[in-house]
Amino acid sequence: MLIIPSIDLAGGRSRIVHWPGAAAGIGAPSDRPEVIAERFVAHGGTPDPGLVERLVHDLDVEVVIAGGVTDLAGIFRLRDAGVTGILLGEVLLSGRIEYPAAMEAAA
């Protein structure tokens, strides 16, 4: 089984405030994705950020995107940004992106 840390983003910020050390009463809350991703990396995890272009270039980890990709242009943009994987669910079930076209765009 894999445990993969992820960051749920809205408007460039994490939708859930990350507060390292909250249980011990220490640490400072943050909704900044880059702070959360750096914390995940420090613990050996791989972030799933939405501020893709900046994070891919700033962090030395593989980035996988889950959600928010609604067309082939998004796949091309993420591929060019250095993303190593995209999880497509809706983007395929709705028919807006066909699986063979997605595979070709990702290549």
Image: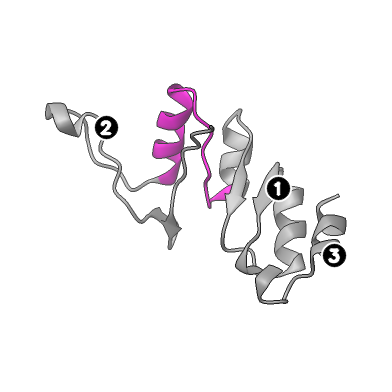
As rendered, which of 47 and 4 lies closer to the eye? 4
CA–CA distance in space, label 2 to label 1: 29 Å
Question: Element under label 3?
Answer: helix
Mark 2 or 1: in front is 2
- Going by the numbered disc 1, the residue's amino acid type is Ala
Amino acid identity at mark 3: Ala
Amino acid at dot 2: Pro
Residue ID for mark 2: 20
Q: Residue 101 carries which label?
A: 3
Q: Does the stretch in magenta take in 42?
A: yes
Residue 34 against residue 80 in the figure, above or below: above
Q: Position of residue 68 (x, y in %)?
A: 57, 63
Residue at position x 52%, y 46% in the image:
49
Asked whether 50 falls inside the magenta stretch, the response is yes
Quick one: label 2, few (<14), some, or many (20+) residues within 10 Å?
some
- Whole-angstrom CA distance, mark 1 to mark 3, is 19 Å
Identify the residue shown where x is 44% and y is 31%: 40
Sequence-first tag of 2 and 1: 2
Residue matched to label 1: 81
Asked if the residue at tag 2 contacts the one at tag 3, i.e. Cβ–Cβ closer than 8 Å, the answer is no
- Mark 2 or mark 3, which is nearer the start of the sequence? 2
Circle 3 packing at 10 Å, graded few (<14), some (14-19), many (20+), is few
Q: Tell me the magenta residue range.
A: 33-52
What's the colour scheme?
one colour
